[in-house]
Image: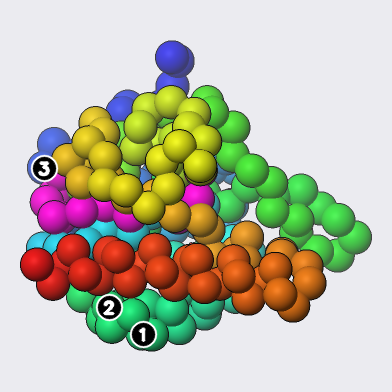
């Protein structure tokens, strides 16, 4: 590959040094579109790392992961299953918001495989620094980053798998996907499954 985040890694691989270096990353064209790099945040030694897709509109403005609508769903379900969000390191597979204008709104666009690969060094270094017991991928962009290849949700969901990113990689759906499910019953079912997945994670954390 040509340019990637690897060209911007700092000498010291502490979270603090990584975060500072990532702020100036130009490892893929997305740096020009987003307001700022949205790096992960959380305790230096978290047992659990949660990986989303990329910052959304609100995250892009605020500079923190999962502070928008999807973050609200995530926070509620974490609380329901008894996982303390403050004890979790939360990040994304891609650190810049990818969007296209739609009227006065900024419409989220899925990152490409190339962009996921370009940004991967940041995620890999975050996980290496935090050394969590498990990594939970929220959706297939995060799963692709963890597995290093495209996977299907039905093949990997709700099981702990060894991946290059973590010896205990768990995949569930993305909370934003729940917001898009139409129909009360289908939505309730999708929510219930997401809650059950995170309850499985909570149970493993308690072991
Ligand atoms: N969706 C994500 O995948 N990550 C965020 O930080 C916010 C929304
Ligand atoms: Fe760098 Fe990732 Fe932003 Fe691309 S998306 S510029 S690789 S931080």
| Label 3 to label 1: alpha-carbon separation | 35 Å
The residue shown at (33%, 54%) is: 136
Where does residue 204 sit, x and y in percent of width and height? 18, 63
The residue shown at (9%, 67%) is: 207
Is residue 62 visible in the rendered image? The answer is no
**Residue for badge 1:** 79
Most foreground residue, 152 or 36: 152
Circle 1: element type: helix
Circle 3: element type: loop
**Magenta stretch in the rendered image:** 128-141
Mark 3 vs 1, N-terminal side: 3
Mark 2 near mark 3, Cβ–Cβ under 8 Å? no
Rendered-image quadrant of the N terminus:
top left
**Residue for badge 3:** 12
Where does residue 109 sit, x and y in percent of width and height? 69, 46
Residue 155 to residue 192: above or below: above
**Residue for badge 2:** 83
Residue 141 to residue 63: above or below: above
The residue shown at (51%, 42%) is: 154
Mark 2 vs 3, N-terminal side: 3
Residue 57 sits in quarter: bottom right
Mark 1 CB within 8 Å of ligand 1: no
Mark 1 near mark 2, Cβ–Cβ under 8 Å? yes
């Amino acid at each position: 590959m040509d340019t990637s985040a690897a060209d911007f890694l700092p000498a010291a691989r502490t979270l603090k040094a990584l975060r500072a270096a990532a702020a100036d990353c130009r490892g893929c064209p997305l740096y020009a579109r987003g307001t700022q790099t949205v790096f992960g945040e959380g305790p230096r030694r978290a047992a659990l790392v949660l990986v989303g897709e990329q910052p959304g509109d609100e995250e892009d403005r605020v500079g923190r992961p999962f502070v928008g609508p999807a973050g609200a769903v995530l926070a509620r379900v974490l609380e329901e299953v008894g996982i303390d969000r403050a004890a979790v390191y939360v990040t994304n597979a891609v650190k810049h918001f990818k969007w296209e204008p739609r009227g006065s709104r900024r419409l989220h666009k899925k990152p490409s495989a190339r962009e996921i690969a370009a940004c991967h060094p940041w995620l890999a270094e975050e996980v290496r620094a935090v050394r969590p017991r498990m990594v939970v991928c929220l959706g297939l962009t995060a799963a692709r980053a963890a597995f290093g290849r495209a996977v299907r949700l039905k093949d990997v969901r709700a099981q702990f798998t060894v991946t290059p990113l973590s010896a205990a990689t768990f995949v569930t759906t993305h909370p934003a996907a729940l917001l898009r499910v139409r129909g009360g019953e289908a939505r309730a079912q999708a929510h219930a499954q997401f809650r059950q997945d995170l309850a499985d994670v909570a149970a493993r954390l308690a072991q």
